[in-house]
């Protein structure tokens, strides 16, 4: 039978597994679909929304290991990691996530030799500008900018200013970030704010509460991370968001950051979806 005629005259199956003319239908015969129906079935379904996942944080680990395993330079590894950020942002948008934080450079990384640090900073600066140029997201560099080289600090502040009015997904990129450093900065700013109001030492101590400190965190005004994902197989937070992450769910993935696949990402979010989040209650 010609294919075109076959599609124009689909088989009708009787109650006893027979065609209308009485010819038995083989049990394995698949249901007849039009080309349009077949195309729709092959298209991947949109991912289910994950309830209460407002803020996803990622420790993007493994760029140097990935490059070394392939005989590539460290710079090439960091560039591959930067490209992966763009890909993951698309995945986050698919899930309707509104805030994403990537940890790109720690305070400890600033102690690396200049031969290692300078290329990494150049990649981060280029990546930041690329994200801002896309005009899709509210790009928000966070970290201890006063500890960064002046050129990098200027680049971070410029990107922050350029993206401030964007209505897209908020994308925090932690550069020169350390959890203890963030807490020190928040406490110092809180104390300075209270001192400026004329409070004495004892009054400052009494007024220094959670709200005062939270107001001066790098992520002030944002929801705390609901889920933290770390790549490369390491199962530690290394000081990442100790204040904001006290109730965060954790997921450790063995894939190196540049190797992270959509399946890896979906598995992390599915694991989060299946967890019961009591928040200590």
Image: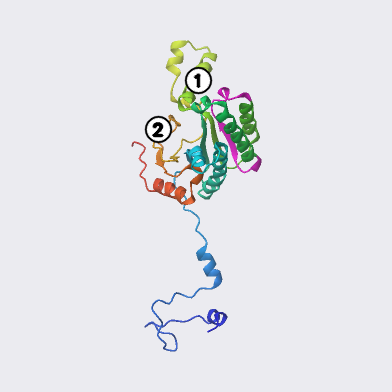
Tell me where residue 171 sits by quadrant. Answer: top right
Residue that appears at 40% across and 39% down = 250
Tell me where residue 158 sits by quadrant. Answer: top right
Residue 206 seen by the camera: yes
**x then y, percent, for residue 1:** 52, 84
The residue tagged 1 is 190
The residue tagged 2 is 246
Q: Is residue 129 depicted above or below 90 in this figure?
A: above
Q: Is 92 displayed left or right of 267 in the figure?
A: right
Q: Quadrant of the C terminus?
A: top left
The residue closer to the viewer here, 104 or 279, is 104
Residue that appears at 59% across and 42% down = 168
Q: CA distance from mark 1 to mark 2?
A: 21 Å
Instruction: Kindly report which numbered mark, 1 or 2, lies closer to the viewer in this rendering.
Output: 2
Q: Is residue 146 magenta?
A: yes
**x then y, percent, for residue 268:** 43, 46
Q: Earlier in the sequence, mark 1 or mark 2?
A: 1
The magenta stretch spans which residues?
Answer: 133-150
Count neighbours of disc 2 (C-alpha within 10 A) and say few if under 14, some if 14 to 19, many if 20 or more.
few
Q: Is residue 119 magenta?
A: no
Q: Is 8 displayed left or right of 281 in the figure?
A: right
**x then y, percent, for residue 118:** 59, 29
Tell me where residue 18 sits by quadrant. Answer: bottom left
**x then y, percent, for residue 9:** 53, 82
Residue that appears at 59% across and 37% down = 139
Furthest residue to the left?
Answer: 281
């Amino acid at each position: 039978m010609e294919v075109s005629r076959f599609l124009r005259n689909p088989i009708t199956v009787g109650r006893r597994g027979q065609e209308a003319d009485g010819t038995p239908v083989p049990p394995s015969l698949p249901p007849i679909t039009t080309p349009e129906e077949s195309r729709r079935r092959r298209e991947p379904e949109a991912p289910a929304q994950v309830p209460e996942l407002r803020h996803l944080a990622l420790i993007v680990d493994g760029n140097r290991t990935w490059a070394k395993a392939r005989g590539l330079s460290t710079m090439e590894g960091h560039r591959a990691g930067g490209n992966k950020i763009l890909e993951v942002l698309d995945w986050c948008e698919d899930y309707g996530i509104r805030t994403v934080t990537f940890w790109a450079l720690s305070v400890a990384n600033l102690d690396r030799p200049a031969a290692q640090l300078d290329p990494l900073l150049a990649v981060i600066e280029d990546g930041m500008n690329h994200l801002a140029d896309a005009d899709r997201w509210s790009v928000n560099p966070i970290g201890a900018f006063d500890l960064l080289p002046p050129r990098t600090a200027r680049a971070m502040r410029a990107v922050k200013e350029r993206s401030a009015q964007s209505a897209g997904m908020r994308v925090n990129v932690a550069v020169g970030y350390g959890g203890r450093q963030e807490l020190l900065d928040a406490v110092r700013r809180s104390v300075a704010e209270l001192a400026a109001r004329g409070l004495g030492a004892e009054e400052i101590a009494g007024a220094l509460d959670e709200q005062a400190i939270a107001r001066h965190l790098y992520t002030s005004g944002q929801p705390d991370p609901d889920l933290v994902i770390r790549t490369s197989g390491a199962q530690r937070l290394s000081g990442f968001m100790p204040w904001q992450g006290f109730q965060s769910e954790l997921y450790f993935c063995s894939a190196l950051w540049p190797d992270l696949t959509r399946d890896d990402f979906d598995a992390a979010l599915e694991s989060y979806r299946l967890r019961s989040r009591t928040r200590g209650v």
